Image (spheres, helix red, strand yellow):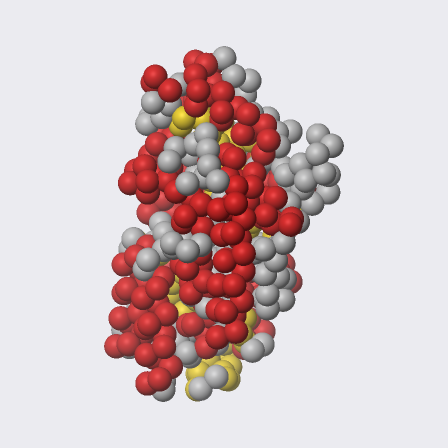
Amino acid sequence: MKLKKLAALILALAMVLSLAACGGSSSSSSTTTTGDSSTATASSDGSYSVTELTVNIWDNNQLAGLQQIADEWTETSGVSVNINVVDWDNYWTLLEAGASGGDMPDVFWMHSNTSQMYMENDLLLNLDDYIAADDAIDLDNYYEGIVALYNSDGVQYAVPKDHDTIALLYNKAIFDEYGIDYPTDDWSWDDVYEAAAAITEAGAADGVYGFAMNTSNNQDGWYNLVQGYGGEVITEDHSDTTIDSDEAKAGMEMMRQILTVSVDQTTVAETGTDSLFMSGKVAMITQGSWMVYSFYTAENSADYYWVEIPYCDANGNGECDDGERVSSYNGLGWAAAYSVADPQAAYDLISWFCAYEQQVEQAELGVTMAGYIGADEAFSEAFGDMDVSAFLKVEEDGTLYFRPYTRNTTVWEDALQQTGCFLDAWLDPSDPDLMSQACDNAATIIRNAIAEE
C-alpha cells in the first residue's frame, strides 16, 4: 500500500472516532488475491489451511445469535469461529491499527461511514470470484443500496449482512399518567409535536418530557424529516445536496418545533436518549431496529410500544400521501481482510452468514433484520409480546431511502454537528431563522466536502 494512501486513511478514520454509531453453503473454490484482482482456483476437498477464524463486531446484543450461527458453520467446516465484541470507537481504532500493522481480524463488519476508505486502500478481500463460484450468494437477492455501498469500481468487497429501518417508540405508562392518546401508525410529525408539547407541559413538575432526540444520531432522526418533506441530504448520485431547499427547510423547521418541547441537547449529550427513555423521563423517541433488543430486555419493557415512523404532512392535507412516510435504511456488510491467511475459509464463513437460511435464522433469533430481501418476516415475532412489526410495515406503507453517504461521509457529517452549522440551532431551537441559516451553512459544507473528495 502506498504510504500516502495509508496516511490519508488514518487521518480519515480518526474522524470516525468523533461520531456515535449509529447490521449458505460453502463454495468450492479458493482464491489468491494480488493487487485489485482475484483469481479463483478449484479446491476439491474443501479443506482449509486454518483451524480458527477471528471475527470482530461492535454490538454485544448480536453476539449470542451470531455465535450460534457461526457454530453451526463450524460443525460443517471444522473451523472454529471466535467472535469478539469491540465497542464502536475502539472497533475502528483496532481496525485502523491492523490496517497499519497488517494484523486485522479475518472477518468483520463494514459500515457506510468507512467502507469507501477501506475499499479504495486495498484493505479488503476482493470477493468477486468467490461470489461468482458460490450458488448460495446472488447479489440480486439483497437490498440494492447495501450491495452498491460495498462495491467500488465494479468490485464487491462485502456481502450485505442486514438492513434496518426506523420506528417511533413510546412509553404507554407516561401517556396514561398525563391522559394523552397513544401514538398510532397514522401519526404525522405534527401529531408528535402536539403530544410532546402536552406531556412536557403536564410533566414539568415531574421532570418528564414528551420527546428526546439525539441530533447526532441522524439516521434515526432528522434525516427522515429532510427526506420526508422532499429534500435530500445527499442527492441520489452522491454529487450534491438540496438541504438548503425550501422543502428541506420545512422538514428542519418541523424538527426545530419538536426540539422546543423536547429534552435539551446538553442533557441528551450527557445522558443519551435511550437512557432518558428507559428511566421514565421521556415519553417518545425514534430508534432503529438494531436497538430493539435493548428495549425488549429493559426493566419496564411491558410499557414500551413501537409504531411506524410518523409521516411528514408536507401538503397539510392531514393524510399520508406517497413519499411522506420515509425511513432511512442502512446495512452492514460482512468483509474479510485483504491479508487474511485463508481467503476461502473467510469467504465461506461470510457466505454462511449471508445465505438465505442463515439470514432467516438471524431474523428468527432477533439478531437483526435480514440483508436478504424477504428473509426477515420472523423478526417481528422474535421478541415475545413486544410487537416490532412497525419496522417491517414501513417497507409497505412508506418509502425507504438509503442512508446518505459520499466517498468521505465523516468529513461533512462531523462538520454539520459543529458550531457554525446545526449545533447552534440544536442548542437554541427557539429561533426559526437560526435553523434556516444552518441549512444554508450545511449545504455549503457538504458541497465543499464533495468537491474535495
Quarter of the rendering occupied by the N terminus: bottom left
Residue at the spot 63% in from the left edge and 66% down from the top edge = 237
Q: Is residue 367 above or below residue 82?
A: above
Percent of width and height locating residue 244: 59, 55
Instruction: State whether residue 110 appears in this view.
Output: no
Q: Nearer the viewer, residue 103 or 135?
A: 103
Percent of width and height locating residue 53: 33, 65
Percent of width and height locating residue 67: 36, 51
Q: Nearer the viewer, residue 106 or 344?
A: 106
Residue at the spot 33% in from the left edge and 57% down from the top edge = 18
Compared across the picture, whether 115 is left or right of 233 comes to left
Q: Is residue 376 above or below residue 75?
A: above
Instruction: State whether residue 416 appears in this view.
Output: yes
Residue at the spot 39% in from the left edge and 33% down from the top edge = 263
Residue at the spot 58% in from the left edge and 55% down from the top edge = 243
Q: Nearer the viewer, residue 39 or 96?
A: 96
